[in-house]
Amino acid sequence: GGVPGRIVEAGGVPGRRASRAVKLRPLLFFPDARHIVFLDWKLRLKRTPASLIRATVGSGPFGFAAFRHPCTAAYTPRGMKPCPQRRPNEAWWRAEARDVLRRGGTEDAGALRRQVERYERAGPLVEYADGALLAWDAAHPVASTLSCAWWAEYARDDSSDRDQLAFARALTTVLAPDSSVSPGKTFQESTRRDGVFLVSEGGGRRGACGGLCHQSDTTSTFVESVGTRVLALGTVPGC
């Protein structure tokens, strides 16, 4: 009378990295699903998943959709959330890596440093997505291409266990990087091309996103941050 299950081989990576397999390779785990939504535990949907699908991958021929990361936004003032660690004119991946190292947010600091050095040599990375909310349309070829590329980049020996950094490199497999685009200006409008929708409606101007906003904008009608939700010892059954 139990729930039927199956074993999924995701491509053997150790430790913390293994926990990202479902997030980065959802089509492997949910092969019969047309649409898939990933929601980080720190967020809460304010509308139904179907509404989110219609507003993102369902709004055009898109296989993948996510919010653009606020740390690439020119409008984000230094010293203010969500990017207080960002230095003037600093590449977002260096700011991200420095903050992760400061917080001890990686199991392999050496791999993170090597990853950042590799990205510096590889050329422009202007598309940086927030990994807390992802939408996929499995029927679109971009979904499988991007998912596989993301996992391959993430699982490299010279990559860290920070999946948002790996996403920016993997995205270049479906969106050719444009050296003429400044990372500081990419929030001016959403990216809608080649099957990818990176949402930055309203150019980061508070309240201008029409409800389809990143969780850092409290005018969002789709998603909101709920902060840290760690249960105290003794509140979990069996503890």
Image: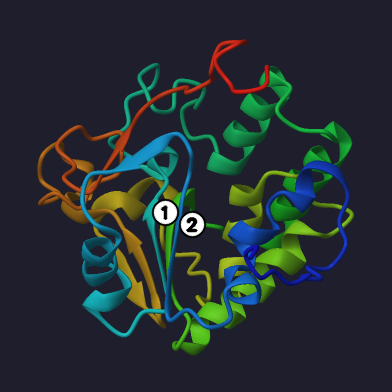
Q: Earlier in the sequence, mark 1 or mark 2?
A: 2
Which image quadrant for residue 201? Answer: bottom left
Q: Residue at coordinates 88% horizontally, 49% vertically from top-left?
A: 14
Vertical side of 28 occupied by 187: above or below: above
Image quarter where the N terminus lies is bottom right
Q: For numbered disc 1, what is the local secondary structure?
A: loop
Report if residue 160 is visible in the image: no
Of residues 160 and 37, the one nearer the viewer is 37
Residue 114 in picture, x, y percent from top left: 83, 45
Image side of residue 5 versus residue 173, left or right: right
Q: Nearer the viewer, mark 1 or mark 2?
A: 2
Residue 132 in picture, x, y percent from top left: 46, 46
Q: Which mark is residue 194?
A: none
Image quarter where the C terminus lies is top right
Vertical side of 9 occupied by 92: above or below: above
- Residue pointed to by mark 2: 126
- Residue pointed to by mark 1: 182
Which image quadrant for residue 63? Answer: bottom left
For the residues labelled 1 and 2, say whether their Cβ atoms are less than 8 Å apart: yes
Of residues 25 and 62, the one nearer the viewer is 25
Residue 48 in picture, x, y percent from top left: 24, 57
Q: Residue at coordinates 70% horizontally, 51% vertically from top-left?
A: 120
Residue type at mark 1: give it.
Ser
- Number of numbered discs: 2
Report if residue 106 is visible in the image: yes
Q: Residue at coordinates 42% horizontally, 46% vertically from top-left?
A: 69
